[in-house]
Amino acid sequence: MTRMAPSTMVQAAPPLVSLQRAGVRFGAVTALRDIDLTLHRGDRLALVGANGSGKTTLLRLLHGLVPPSDGRCNRHVLQPEGRPMIGAMLFQRPFLLRLSAGRNVSLGLWLRGLPRAERAAATERALHRVGLAALAARPARELSGGQQQRLALARAWALRPDILFLDEPTASLDPSAKREVEQLIEDFAGEGMTVVLATHNLGQAKRLAQRVAYLESGRLVVERPVGEFFNQSDTLPVEAQQFLRGEMVWA
Amino acid sequence: MSTFTDSVQLAAQLVWHGDAELWRIVGLSVRVSLAACVLGGVLGLALGAWLAVARFPGWRGVIWVLNTLLALPSVIVGLLVYLLLSRAGPLGVYGLLFTPTAMVFAQAVLVLPLIAALTRRLVQDALAEGGDQLRSLGAGPYAAALLMLLHERRAVLTIGLTAFGRAVSEVGAVMIVGGNINGVTRVMTTAIALETSKGDLALALALGAVLLGVVALLNLAVAALHGAARAAGQRREAWAA
């Protein structure tokens, strides 16, 4: 694997999660293999690759939703706070319980054991943050696609996560909803939240990420700062170059 | 054909005139079956939700047994509960045999596998769709399963109705553990069996019609409950707008 040294800012930040030769298998299917990757605090990493390349599985592995079948996945204590990091994940199609928008947000806070009064205040703050305060009482499943994704962002943001995993967060949205969601992600990252984003949209990776990692058939082929990945693509491994040119990698 | 016409007329008369005996039988049937569904429901929902997320050696065997118990004959349940509650049985000291409590117990045993099996399938399917997202919010596996019961509450209500239908329409178990004692443990199904054996087919059919009517009314009540919940949601939405 070709890899550039991370930027100075990222290098100085403490690590949050590190993978060492990590692999994930589902029965006979190998979804990920030999992944070496370290996420630092404040990182904005985009995972790109074709369908089935392992982006979602890598997000789930980093978040702790699947254990590694091989290698190691180390979750570091947050520095300087000295507490375990909090992660949240936004999925391509948010799963919202058949409850009101407000209750969908407060649910995560309830699961974390927040007292009722604090829960109500945090829910209101989160809904306000994504512009859905007026729709708190509306059944979540009756919201539009963009509103549902913003609600899922509010639900994740309300948990005050240190790291936010985003799996194709704008894949099924119209351009205006896409812009709104991207702006929110940008704002959250601007507040210091670590963001890991899986996307097919290279423009989105360019706009939101500092680093880009390209995956193919469950392998991490290359990981570079965003400028190098897109502007010096002739230095990338041939598979990544083909992907950037929009060529079928099996052609 | 005349028997059928007679029975319909008789059923209408019994209901119209508010026949005390009929309503006592109907009341006891509904009370016993509702209590059995509540008891079997609490245990069955918890068991089904747990089986949806638990994985242990022999799990497949447990699921196989549970699915087999869906076809559990009510007379077998009646016999087992009879053995438990009879004087020589382990629970004989409580003197529950031939009481409505024994009937509740028998019907709860009957509906428990039904509720647990359907709940397991329901929760497992729901978790396949949104389990990761609930876990991402901090829910443990069992908490996620219980949240799915809340999410799928309409389907849970349908499971409850199915269980009630099974409980209120069975005759074997309540006959064995209740004894069909007039005024004490006589319910609709045992009364129908008795009237049929006496040759009073019209009264038996009339009771059958009332039994169907009870289930139909319950269905209507549940549908109305759904409608009211939907209307309340729309009102909330209108106020919020």
Image (cartoon, rainbow, N blue to C red):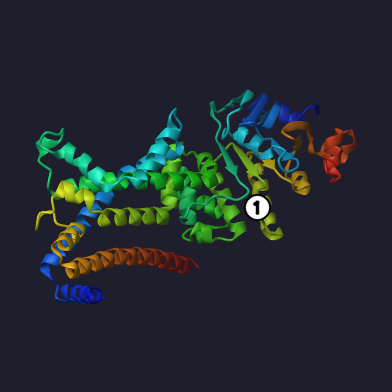
- Left or right for B62, reference A74: left
Element type at marker 1?
helix
Q: Residue furthest right?
A: A234
Q: Residue at x 34, y 67 (%)?
A: B220
> Residue A198 placed where, x, y %?
69, 42
- Residue indicated by mark 1: A181
Q: Position of residue B101 (x, y in %)?
A: 16, 47
* Residue A96 sits above or below residue A160 on the image: below
Q: Quadrant of the N terminus of chain A?
A: top right
Q: Is residue B109 left or right of residue A86?
A: left
Quadrant containing the C terminus of chain A is top right
| Badge 1: residue crowd in 10 Å (few <14, some 14–19, many ≥20) | many
Q: Is residue A14 visible?
A: no
Who's the residue at 15% across and 63% down the image?
Answer: B195
Viewer-closest of A207 and A221: A221
Q: Is residue A194 left or right of residue B144?
A: right
Which quadrant of the figure has residue B43?
top left
The chain letter for the residue carrying disc 1 is A
Residue B20 percent coordinates (x, y): 11, 68
Q: Residue at x 45, y 34 (%)?
A: B60
Residue A212 showing in the rendered view: yes
Q: Nearer the viewer, residue A16 or A242?
A: A242
